[in-house]
Amino acid sequence: MKKKSIIALLVALCLVFCFTLTACGGNSDEPSDAQEEAAEETVEEEIETLETIINNDSSLKEQVASGSGQEGLTIEVKDNDINYIFDMTAISDLSEEQLKDPAMIEALDNALDEGKDQFINLCTTLEDQTGLEGVHMIVTYTYKEDVLTTRTFDKNGVVE
């Protein structure tokens, strides 16, 4: 129970921090054989990941979904990666030209750099509290389908 409440708190903190940063600045229908084998292996051998922890707890799953429902924000949890995708078209009145301007992208990069310690601490705390290894926070700013900038963090810093 303590593990679940800590994860819920960390997910909430991630959301709050991501909104602070925002203020600053082809699949086929048929699965392949490899995908089917991977799915079978997963069922046979359930490996605990951040994704499985969240998917197995309805309140955590709801918190992630409600955060993802915020205007312009999509949160995806895959394995041990938490992806925050900010669609700047939904959260900014700036034009495409302004958003794609190198100065704007630099400002977004600077905001990510300034917040890196918080992301590093969140990754470290998630790993410590869950016993998982390899937790990543991935923050991506997009304009429609175009990636403006992205940064991946883990407990050791920025992942290149």
Image (cartoon, grey):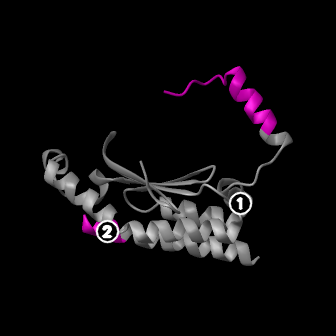
Image location (x, y in percent) of residue 2: 73, 78
Image location (x, y in percent) of residue 118: 44, 71
Look at label 2 and name its amino acid: Glu
Residue in the picture at 71% in, 60% down: 53
Residue in the picture at 57% in, 68% down: 124
Label ID, residue 114: 2
Look at label 1 and name its amino acid: Ile
Along the line of sight, which residue is nearer the eye, 75 or 127? 127
Residue 142 visible? The answer is no
Element under label 1?
Answer: helix
In this rendering, is residue 7 above or below 105?
A: below
Image location (x, y in percent) of residue 143: 28, 46
Along the line of sight, which residue is nearer the eye, 83 or 122? 122
Is residue 153 shown in magenta?
Answer: no
Q: Which residues are magenta?
A: 20-41
Q: Is residue 116 left or right of residue 60?
A: left
Label ID, residue 53: 1
